[in-house]
Image (cartoon, rainbow, N blue to C red):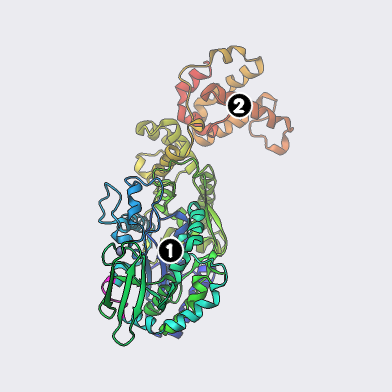
Amino acid sequence: MAQSTETTDWVSRFADEVIEESERRAPGKPVVVASGLSPSGPIHLGNLREVMTPHLVADEIRRRGHQVRHLISWDDYDRYRKVPNGVDGVDGTWAEHIGKPLTSVPAPKGSAHPNWAEHFKAAMVDALAEMGVEFDGISQTEQYTSGVYREQILHAMKHRGDIDAILAQYRTKKDPAKKPQSQKPVDEAELEAAEGSGAAAEDDGSSGSAGYFPYKPFCGQCEKDLTTVTAYDDATTELSYTCTACGFAETVALNEFNRGKLVWKVDWPMRWAYEGVVFEPSGVDHSSPGSSFQVGGQIVGIFGGKQPIGPMYAFVGISGMAKMSSSKGGVPTPADALKIMEPQLLRWLYARRRPNQSFKIAFDQEIQRLYDEWDKLDAKVTDGSALPADVAAHSRAVGTAAGELPRTPRPMPYRTLASVADITAGAEAQTLRILSELDPTDPLSSLDAVRPRLDKAEAWINTHVPADQRTIVRDEPDAELLKSLDEQAQGSLRLLLDGLADHWSLDGLTHLVYGVPKVQAGFSADATPKELPPEIKTAQRSFFALLYHLLVGRDTGPRLPTLLLAVGQDRVRALLGE
Ligand SMILES: [Zn+2]
């Protein structure tokens, strides 16, 4: 079992609080933490915080030897609100399903899954497995349609007056409430529009001429939730409704009827009480008066429960997605992130920031810097020089209470792997040759040793680096440029070419390319910046620019030592005019 990291970071502090609170509320019972996700379309990468925050706390509690359940409530009995744009296998005809439960909407064409909700849930389940997130998934469709919440529904109907009174305190104000899983930046405008058009009423139920009801049946004919309860008899539980979509009307006995649900603002606190949830965070937009978390705190008492400890988590941004194709509705998902980064890195991004701190997940060049930072931390943890909070974040990133996640046996710098993938376009023999030459004292015998990191770097180059930033090595020497060089420039190339064979490694070539301008100016190649005049920097810059022009026909490119290794000695010699 992995070591606990007592009270050194935010995760430990929440774990202390949650264990204590759980002992007070339900002594001797497993600790229950929860997340809620709506599979209403591709699940946005930003919503991963809804899962990662309780996951990290649950994992710390598990590391301390306690029993803990992390529930993920799949809100798949929610109504289908809109057809997301740009999802493969979906067209405008899906609009006819708006108002049905997500599990009653057909999956996109070509999907292996039985319905809409299952299709989008499956991708998330795979991503969570890759990240080592252990959870109990609860389908709200299964819960509601099998009558699990029957008592709670009848109880809510009986106490509808009390619920209505609580909700009434907020009705005059503009309702800012959204479900926690609706944190989708691309959809914000649409969501606001939807709420403005009365969708907020879906969250707390509506008052018709028969009064207020916290429960909505799905229509027995068209399956939509555009129903109005017209009568309810507390004694017999007979409920009558009409459907405004198709005109259908019927009277059912609620004590044996399973095709409907509590409205969101009542549903959520009902489940806190039903499951005994002690910890459930929610998006930062829920802190305002009238939000579902606040109101839920008042309603949960009606069900005999208590509000969970619920920190607000800040927004997680994405950088560099604009350049990505929108084949999946333009929404970056956790699966997209895991294509370009190892699960350890993604876990680390969540572990190292307190929930109230926002951060960005990089799909652009920034990912290379992030990986450098991660490798540096990894080295510090190994040599024992990392700070306790950093050690804690690292330990939460590399594994869980169940053990370490599979890691790349030889984690070469992501930046280098990306450059090599860029230049070789994935050719395996060439990639192995270049990576072996990086450190000739410890050559790489197989690409397996650098996987999966190599595959992630390759995927990043292929899907997120725009064509005009890709590196294309020249086929033929630039004869014109070579002919036009002055004596100084020719001399610098000569020095480089003469040193190539002896310096053919990453460290060797780094020393060589920085050393050439120093030697030309009459200094030792080993001279440190302090011993050198500032002009040397200028000379280095123009030397590097010259090399880039001769090798790849541009001003810049991947780091020169990596580029030289990637191009190969013979081709470098040819392109530099030897
Ligand atoms: Zn209907």
Residue 533 located left or right of residue 414 = right
Image quadrant occupied by the N terminus: bottom left
Q: Is residue 435 above or below residue 478?
A: below
Percent coordinates x, y for residue 27 in the rendering: 40, 85
Q: Is residue 147 magenta?
A: yes
Q: Is residue 256 above or below residue 552?
A: below
Disc number placed over residue 378 in the picture, else none:
none
Which residue occupies 51% across, 46% down?
A: 367
Q: Secondary structure beneath disc 2?
A: helix
Looking at marks 2 and 1 on the same chain, the residue that comes earlier in the sequence is marked by 1
Examine the residues drawn in magenta and state their main secondary structure: loop
Nearest-to-viewer mark from 2 and 1 = 1
Q: Is mark 1 within 8 Å of ligand 1?
A: no
Which residue occupies 34% across, 40% down?
A: 446
Q: CA distance from mark 2 to mark 1?
A: 47 Å
Between 207 and 414, the residue placed more toward the observer is 207
Quadrant of residue 101 in the image?
bottom left
Residue with the mark numbered 1: 51
Identify which amino acid the numbered label 2 is placed on. Answer: Ala
Between 528 and 400, the residue placed more toward the observer is 400
Residue 258, visible in the rendered structure:
no
Task: Determine whether label 2 and label 1 are within 8 Å by CB.
Answer: no
Residue 500 located left or right of residue 103 = right
Q: Is residue 76 magenta?
A: no
Residue with the mark numbered 2: 545
Q: Magenta residues?
A: 145-150
- Crowd class of label 2 (few under 14; some 14 to 19; many from 20; radius 10 Å): some
- Crowd class of label 1 (few under 14; some 14 to 19; many from 20; radius 10 Å): many
